[in-house]
Image: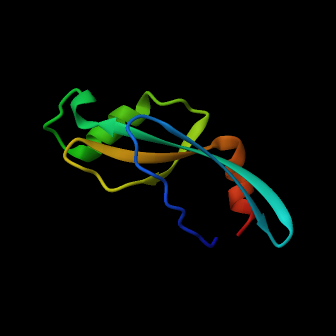
Amino acid sequence: MSYIAIPIPREKGKQDIQIEVTVNNQKQSLHYKVELFYWDDCKNPQGHRADCIAELLAKHDPKWMVYYIGSPTDEFVPITFVERSEKNTIRSSH
């Protein structure tokens, strides 16, 4: 699958992103969301960050799957999700 990058302004909290693309004359609508997960929300904020991310994602809505884990800061890590119903659309387009 090919990728394109679309700059999304970084804002606090959730971002709901809906994109409609046309590839080879076929329209597709994709639904993403970006959430910021704060290290302080972990049971052990000083522990290993991978364990923290796993802990935070364990509570996440199963309707969404992780699409991309962004660059962490000292305060949070941005994680992009895609709706599971659209996972098949994404996979079938490669």
Judged left or right of residue 29, residue 62 is: left
State the image coordinates of residue 5 (x, y, percent, origin top left): 53, 66
Q: Nearer the viewer, residue 52 or 38?
A: 38
Q: Where the N terminus falls, by quadrant?
A: bottom right
Judged left or right of residue 49, residue 67 is: right
Quarter of the rendering containing residue 51? top left
Q: Residue at x 22, y 26 (%)?
A: 43
Judged left or right of residue 49, residue 56 is: right
Q: Nearer the viewer, residue 86 or 17?
A: 17
Judged left or right of residue 21, residue 47 is: left
Which residue lies most toward the right here? 25
State the image coordinates of residue 48 (x, y, percent, origin top left): 19, 44
- In this picture the colour scheme is rainbow
State the image coordinates of residue 60 (x, y, percent, origin top left): 47, 30
Residue 93 to residue 76: above or below: below
State the image coordinates of residue 31 (x, y, percent, origin top left): 65, 45
Q: Residue at x 22, y 41 (%)?
A: 75
Quarter of the rendering containing residue 70? bottom left
Q: Where the C terminus falls, by quadrant?
A: bottom right
Q: Residue at x 16, y 39 (%)?
A: 47
> Total number of numbered labels?
0
Q: Nearer the viewer, residue 40 or 57?
A: 40
